[in-house]
Image (cartoon, rainbow, N blue to C red):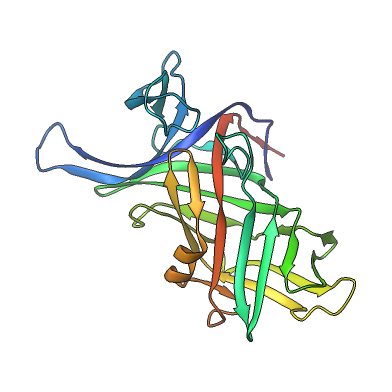
Amino acid sequence: MNRLRAVTGLCMICIVAFSAIGAQSASAVTKGTTAYTCKVPGVGDTPVGASFSDAHCTVAGGSTRHVEIPANTTTHTTVGNENTQNGTTESTPFSLKATVATIPIKITATGVTTTNGAWLENKTEGAEHYAFGKGKVLFTGVVVHEPANCTVVQGARVDEIETEELEGTTKGQGDFVKFAPVTGNVIAEFEIVNSGGTCAAAQKVKIIGSVKGKPNGATIEFTHEEGTTQGTLRFGSAVGPKAGLEGKLTVKAGRGGLDES
């Protein structure tokens, strides 16, 4: 069984679109969206492109750079909503919204983090470069804002939701990163239950399908409007009501490895 060692020396990861002309032939054009670390370059690093003054590689100027992550090299990561607003000093709450049988449902989480050793790799397929990774996501501090008198449980968890193992990829996604279950189509299962009164939305819930976020420097942003326009995230079943996800994530990488046990 694989498990992640403690990850040290954390730095941000940017997902960047590019188009490069091969040196041997002007017709050999490589396109794609790939992952770079965002940090002050050290010995042995290969910096790419412009300089930035912030840890998320969004503000021009300074000593922070995009640094290449070699292809087919596993980079162990953590994904979370920390440092995603107010000058990267605060977290951004995550919310899921849907309307089920005329009942508006809004569920918000204050914390987002990965579990079970998330990782990513840069891949090449034909003329396309892309980033690909896997991991589970844990939402904490979960509150049902609409309707009233509801709370969330998942087995022994209260006010927490852990997803199934998800894969994220930029392959064929243009300016987006797509997240979907590794197996099947269920992202997460949980229950909405009564809490201090009658909950109009009490039910067993499956979140189905996939959702895309848009990278900006080291941040991946999800909006409710974009999610419902995509129409791929569903509440209850593959043909259930559309759901929208709202929030921001950052991806961090560090030195570490997989222990065999």
Q: Position of residue 115 (x, y in %)?
A: 68, 47
Q: Position of residue 59 (x, y in %)?
A: 41, 30
Q: Residue furthest top?
A: 43
Q: Position of residue 155 (x, y in %)?
A: 82, 65
Across the whole image, how many numbered discs are drawn on residues?
0
Whether 93 is drawn above or below 66: the answer is below
Q: Residue furthest bottom?
A: 101
Image quadrant in which the C terminus is located: top right
Whether 43 is drawn above or below 128: the answer is above
Q: Is residue 159 left or right of residue 62?
A: right
Q: Is residue 174 left or right of residue 22?
A: right
Which residue appears at 49% of the width and 51% of the height? 221
Whether 112 is drawn above or below 10: the answer is below
Q: Residue furthest right?
A: 196
Image quarter for residue 42?
top left
Q: Is residue 109 left or right of residue 166?
A: right
Which residue appears at 87% of the width and 71% of the height? 195
Image quarter for residue 217?
top left
Image quarter for residue 77?
top right
Image quadrant in which the N terminus is located: top right
